[in-house]
Every structure is written in structure tokens, then in C-alpha cells.
Image (tube, grey):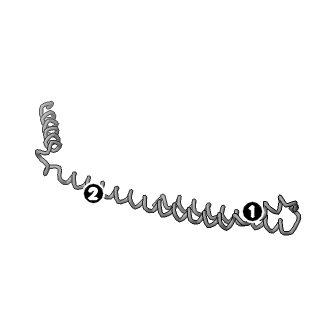
């Protein structure tokens, strides 16, 4: 009983050796075709993910830059008022600080929405 199993394993080894060395290429053609398809699909998926990631990074960088340009004058004005001797209880300082906190909370809400959307996209 041991002899037939050895010959089957020997035949399998010989077939594998012929396929690897290129002597019997047509024997493994379906496996090669499946492997090529899997590699091609994986490469296309990787490329699309990279393009999507670069596009998302560019859009988020632009949005953060635009928000910084919008926030910078308000922050500068509120700090200038506080350094200039005004108190927190003065109306212009309160309006500047409240608007600054409002804009910061909007930015935080956008970041939370962006993070939750990106985590949902990862499960697709």
C-alpha cells in the first residue's frame, strides 16, 4: 500500500517540477491564468485606492487651508483685543471669542464627519 502513495507523490513532484522548469507549461495553465487575474485585480484595486487617497488628501488639505484663512483674522483680532487691554466682558471681545469658538466647533464637527465617513468607506 505504501508503494502507490509514493508513486502518486512522485508523479505530483515530477509534474510540479516540469511546470516550474517550463517543460510542461500547459498543464498548469488554468492556475497561471487565475493567478494572473488575481494579481491584475489586486494591482488595479491598489492603484484606485492610491488615487482615491491622494484626491481625498488634496481636498482635505485645501479645506483646512481655506478654514485657516478664514479663522486667522478672527483669531488675530481676538488676541489683539485681549493684548490691547480689553477685557473678556467687553462686547467686541466676546463677539470675537464666540465667533472663534463657533468656527472651531464647526471645524471639529467637519473633522468628525470626515473621519466617520472614511471609516465607513473602509468596509466597502
**Disc nearer the start of the sequence (1/2):** 2
Q: Nearer the viewer, residue 99 or 82?
A: 82
| Residue at x 14% of width, y 49% of height | 25
Q: Secondary structure at mark 2?
A: helix
Quadrant in the picture for residue 84: bottom right
Q: Nearer the viewer, residue 65 or 12?
A: 65
Residue count near mark 1 (Cα–Cα under 10 Å), binned few <14, some 14–19, many ≥20: few
The circle on residue 22 is: none
Q: Secondary structure at mark 1?
A: helix
Quadrant containing the N terminus is: top left
Q: Nearer the viewer, residue 80 or 56?
A: 80
As drawn, 6 above or below 49: above
Residue 58, horizontal then vertical, whole percent: 51, 63
* Residue identified by numbered label 1: 76
Quadrant in the picture for residue 90: bottom right
Q: How many marks?
A: 2
The circle on residue 37 is: 2
The answer to whether residue 35 is left or right of residue 120 is: left
Camera-nearest label, 1 or 2: 1
| Residue at x 21% of width, y 52% of height | 32
Quadrant in the picture for residue 23: top left
Kindly report the distance in space between the C-alpha atoms of the residues bearing marks 1 and 2. 57 Å
Quadrant containing the C terminus is: bottom left
| Residue at far left of view | 23
Residue 42, horizontal then vertical, whole percent: 34, 56
As drawn, 8 above or below 123: above
| Residue at x 56% of width, y 62% of height | 61
Residue count near mark 2 (Cα–Cα under 10 Å), binned few <14, some 14–19, many ≥20: few
Amino acid at each position: 500500500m505504501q508503494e502507490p502513495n509514493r508513486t502518486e507523490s512522485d508523479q505530483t513532484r515530477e509534474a510540479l517540477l516540469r511546470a516550474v522548469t517550463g517543460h510542461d507549461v500547459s498543464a498548469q495553465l488554468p492556475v497561471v491564468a487565475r493567478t494572473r487575474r488575481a494579481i491584475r485585480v489586486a494591482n488595479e484595486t491598489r492603484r484606485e485606492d492610491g488615487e482615491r487617497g491622494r484626491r481625498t488628501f488634496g481636498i482635505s488639505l485645501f479645506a483646512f487651508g481655506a478654514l485657516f484663512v478664514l479663522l486667522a483674522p478672527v483669531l488675530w483680532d481676538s488676541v489683539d483685543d485681549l493684548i490691547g487691554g480689553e477685557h473678556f466682558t467687553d462686547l467686541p471681545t466676546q463677539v470675537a471669542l464666540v465667533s472663534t469658538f463657533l468656527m472651531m466647533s464647526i471645524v471639529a464637527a467637519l473633522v468628525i464627519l470626515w473621519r466617520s465617513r472614511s471609516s465607513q468607506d473602509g468596509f466597502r
